[in-house]
Image: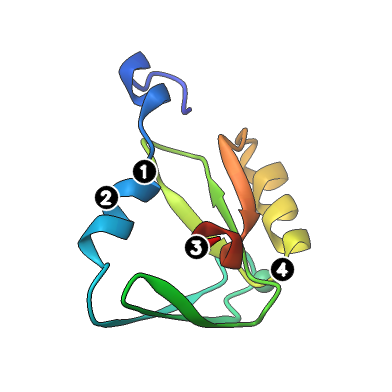
Amino acid sequence: MAPGAPEFLDGVDFCFPVRRLYDRGRVRLNDACASCARRIWVVVEDGRLVAVEPTAAWHVRAGGCGVNNVFCRPACAAEWLEVHRFKAAERGPVHALWA
Ligand SMILES: [Zn+2]
């Protein structure tokens, strides 16, 4: 959690609202790696992950109140965390968010 963030946010599962809001229909996220700007896209259909490109895409929750960032690969995430001196509250492969 970011310094200064209210303590009650520590226990909030920020993935829950996203999964609940997008559990019907087809959702496509077009984004860019927060470190190198490589294109990243994710397709979710009826609450299930259909595709993610690149397949090694990585997510990190850090740097603010539940701010999620996506990266093209774990190394880009590690570099971003080091440059910004953020401590990751959560991190892992994007595909694992729907596991
Ligand atoms: Zn990258």
**Label 3 belongs to which residue?**
98
Asked if the residue at tag 2 contacts the one at tag 1, i.e. Cβ–Cβ closer than 8 Å, the answer is: yes
**Label 4 belongs to which residue?**
73
Give the spatial CA distance, label 1 vs label 4. 21 Å
Q: Is residue 44 above or below residue 63?
A: below
Asked if the residue at tag 3 contacts the one at tag 2, i.e. Cβ–Cβ closer than 8 Å, the answer is: no
Q: Nearer the viewer, residue 10 or 5?
A: 10
Residue at position x 72%, y 43% in the image? 82
Element class at badge 1: loop
Q: Earlier in the sequence, mark 4 or mark 3?
A: 4
The quarter of the image that holds ligand 1 is bottom right
What is the three-letter code of the residue carrying label 4?
Arg
**Label 2 belongs to which residue?**
17
Residue density around tag 3, few if under 14, some if 14–19, many if 20 or more, within 10 Å: few
Split into 4 quadrants, where in the image is the C terminus? bottom right
**Label 1 belongs to which residue?**
14
Confirm if mark 4 falls within 8 A of ligand 1.
yes
- In the image, residue 49 lies at what x, y percent? 47, 75
Total of numbered circles in the picture? 4
Give the spatial CA distance, label 1 vs label 2. 6 Å
Residue at position x 42%, y 73% in the image? 48
For residue 41, say whether it is visible. no
Give the spatial CA distance, label 2 vs label 4. 25 Å
Q: Nearer the viewer, residue 49 or 75?
A: 49
- In the image, residue 68 lies at what x, y percent? 45, 52
Element class at badge 4: loop
Quadrant in which residue 44 is drawn: bottom left
